[in-house]
Image (spheres, rainbow, N blue to C red):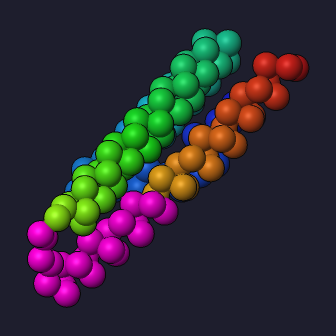
Amino acid sequence: MITSKIFETRKGQVSYHRRTICELHRRIYDLCVLELQDNPEFLKKIISLLEEAWLYGLKMNRKLVENKLGLIEKEIAKPNTNFDKKEASRLRKERVRLTGMVKDNTVLIGMIEEMEKDKDYE
């Protein structure tokens, strides 16, 4: 059976009642494996494209999170901004959460790119 790095992570969990791009890639992968298992060469080509699209999705997610984090930083840095304690606490927690997401995505993308380099040398 053909395996894929798409399934080696926990990224792509459903949030806010919408599917993520990573979850959609997993669903497509499932359907391809079930429907195209009799044609392994074609399946390999499709899986390779899905993995590439999945990596682009991770990079896009990281960039979107970085942008959102930048907006929070700008909001906090505005002069003459008076936050109440509750709002300041919420913004700090959101900043910590988003920073963790960026770090997780960066580590995951690095691991995948290293795997790709190793595959290219084979």
Question: In front here: 116 or 86?
Answer: 86
Q: Residue at x 61, y 15 (%)?
A: 45
Q: Is residue 27 magenta?
A: no
Q: Residue at x 60, y 41 (%)?
A: 109
The picture places residue 25, in percent across and down from the top left corner, at 45, 35
Above/below status of 50 relative to 24 = above
Q: Residue at x 40, y 36 (%)?
A: 60
The quadrant in which the N terminus is found is top right
Q: Is residue 86 magenta?
A: yes
Q: From the viewer's perspective, is 40 left or right of 25?
A: right
Q: Is residue 114 visible?
A: yes
Question: In front here: 79 or 112?
Answer: 79
The picture places residue 71, in percent across and down from the top left corner, at 25, 53
Q: From the viewer's perspective, is 4 left or right of 12?
A: right
Q: Is residue 34 visible?
A: no
The quadrant in which the C terminus is found is top right
Above/below status of 43 relative to 6 = above
Question: In front here: 84 or 97?
Answer: 84
Which region of the structure is painted magenta?
80-100
Q: From the viewer's perspective, is 48 left or right of 111?
A: left
The single residue placed furthest to the front in the displayed view is: 79
Main secondary structure of the magenta stretch = helix
Q: Residue at x 77, y 26 (%)?
A: 117
The picture places residue 93, in percent across and down from the top left corner, at 34, 75
